[in-house]
Amino acid sequence: VGLSAALQARVLKPHWKISVIERDTFGGGGSTKNAGFACFGSLSELAHDRSVLGDDEAAALLKKRIDGLKLLRSSLGDSSIGYRDCGSLELIRKGTGYAMPSLETISEVNAWAAEATGTMHTFHIAEGRELAGINSTMIEGAIASPLEGAIDTGKMMQALRLKAQKTGIRLLFGLNVTGWNQHTANHQIEIERAGSLGTAKRFAMKAPHVVIATNASARELIPKCDVNPTENMVLVTEAIDNLRFDGTVHMDEGHLYARNIQNRMLIGGGRHWNLKNNIELEKKLKALLNEAFPETLNATIEYQWTGVLGIGSNRIPIVSKLHARSVAAVKMGGMGVAIGMQLGKESIELLLSD
């Protein structure tokens, strides 16, 4: 979001000096620790949004996600972000309390979503060939969407950084913004960086305009912000020969997700299980992976990590003015790939308004 905001600022204000300050030395965070889903929401996720937000607000949020994905792909190019037009499945697992929707329900959702997606066929009941590699005995059924896909998040961030640097935007890594003063003509930004022998060096920078785009960490700088950091775990298997499943999967209203990534199976999520620790979560995710995708049964987990989502009381992202010359663009709600570039663009348009 920060890089996208910087790029939009460069377009609208070509004479500005623009810097992106990043705490992680390698620019990690949620932008590279996400699972690479180019998604806008499964049918059950959209049903949840409609029940909480109402039809109009939920439709506007869906359009924001669709527009954000289009902007990401058109700005960077599909090859630069490793985009795969592989579609998605939502698996309705037996014994979880989630019901398989009727054909009438799917048709109604398709009609509601059509203005945002541009088609009356956003979702359909998955056919047998679409379930290759999945244990069909564990599910009530599955809903497919041909409109979703997957990306390589590492490639995406590399492409964003290169594009920013080519326009003269400075990328400052390893600097932790610990505070800021918004009541002066120039915002004073307090910064800490690691020094030698574990010491910390502190200094300040000044800038007339500021965008805070720290997503899950927003409350460190904006204490009353409706953002709660929530950990998600991701597991990735070793490469599996002749792995049949080659798409993306959502389960349990989007709280669980899985995908083929270079012939490895990735699984992540599980925060709705409310388990005591990550050891229990890892075991349960691995067991679900083996149950849903039998070809993973003898595969070892070769990579795993945790990332932090920015979740709030609802899924509407926050793009709001904090001051005449400062804006917050936070709370991705687990949809940062879809809406990140769009929110960066909106943050600069808001910053320059009035």
Image (tube, rainbow, N blue to C red):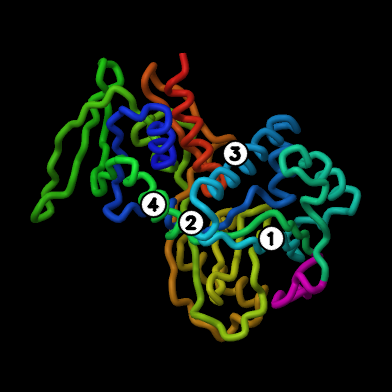
Q: Residues within 10 Å of mark 3 (few under 14, many from 20)?
A: some
The mark lying in front, picked from 1 and 4, is: 1
Residue position marked by numbered label 3 in the rendering: 315
Q: Which mark is residue 5?
A: none
Q: Residue at x 51, y 76 (%)?
A: 237
Residue sitting at the far top: 354
Q: CA distance from mark 3 to mark 4?
A: 20 Å
Residue sitting at the far left: 197
The mark lying in front, picked from 2 and 3, is: 2
Q: Kindly indicate whether the residue at mark 3 contacts the one at mark 2 (C-beta within 8 angstroms).
A: no
The mark lying in front, picked from 1 and 3, is: 1
Q: Nearer the viewer, residue 312 or 158?
A: 158
Residue position marked by numbered label 2 in the rendering: 34
Residue position marked by numbered label 1 in the rendering: 88
Q: CA distance from mark 1 to mark 3?
A: 21 Å
Magenta-drawn segment? 128-141
Q: Is residue 112 above or below residue 278?
A: above
Residue position marked by numbered label 4 in the rendering: 29
Q: Residue at x 70, y 52 (%)?
A: 42
Label 4's element? Answer: helix
Q: Nearer the viewer, residue 251 or 57?
A: 57
Measured as percent of width and height from the top left, residue 199 is found at 11, 49
Q: Nearer the viewer, residue 80 or 340?
A: 80
Three-letter code for the amino acid on which mark 1 is drawn: Ser
Q: Residue at x 24, y 44 (%)?
A: 175
Three-letter code for the amino acid on which mark 3 is drawn: Arg
> Is 103 left, or right, of 213 in this rendering?
right
